[in-house]
Image (spheres, grey):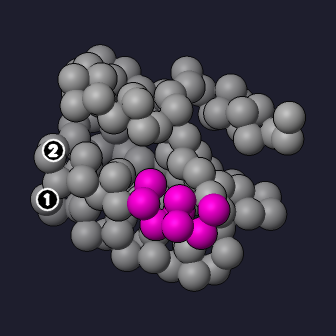
Amino acid sequence: METYAIEVVGDLMILRADGGLNSGTAGQLSEKIAALVAGGVRSIIVDCSQLEIISSLGLSSLLMLHTRIKRVGGEVKLCGLKGSIVQVIRMTKLDRIFELYPDIEAARLAFRPK
């Protein structure tokens, strides 16, 4: 899996996850998240439209992301989930923790002040 920032505006970062989120890549995501939080990022959109596979360690790394961002008063939103990935998120009830959006723009609009 490759994760990379596709946009940063203020404290909002859009992070794209490509390929798979599993035991081989969860550590990479954890390191990246620690750096982002230390750098002041408080709002993250994870674009999962290119994510093809997710394991239990991948789910765990998403939960860790949620926990770290929540500790500093931030929030994580997931978008672009499809196929078996969205089924896994729903079966594990992570859709109760993460807000899910169909695309980046819908997730970005959800961060706008009310």
Residue count near mark 1 (Cα–Cα under 10 Å), binned few <14, some 14–19, many ≥20: some
Residue 10: image location, x then y, percent: 80, 63
Residue 98 horizontal side relative to residue 84, left or right: right
Q: Decide: marks 1, 2 in contact (CB < 8 A)?
A: yes
Q: Which residue is mark 2?
A: 55
Name the residue rendered at 85%, 41% in the picture. 113
Relative to 61, say whether 104 is above or below.
Answer: above
**Could you say which is closer to the camera, residue 36 or residue 5?**
36
Q: Give the magenta part as a residue range.
A: 66-73
**Could you say which is closer to the camera, residue 91 or residue 21?**
91
Q: Earlier in the sequence, mark 1 or mark 2?
A: 1
Residue count near mark 2 (Cα–Cα under 10 Å), binned few <14, some 14–19, many ≥20: some
Name the residue rendered at 63%, 62% in the picture. 73
Label annotation for residue 23: 1
The answer to whether residue 13 is seen in the rendering is no
Q: Secondary structure at mark 2?
A: loop
Q: Which quadrant of the figure has residue 5?
A: bottom right
Residue 6: image location, x then y, percent: 62, 53
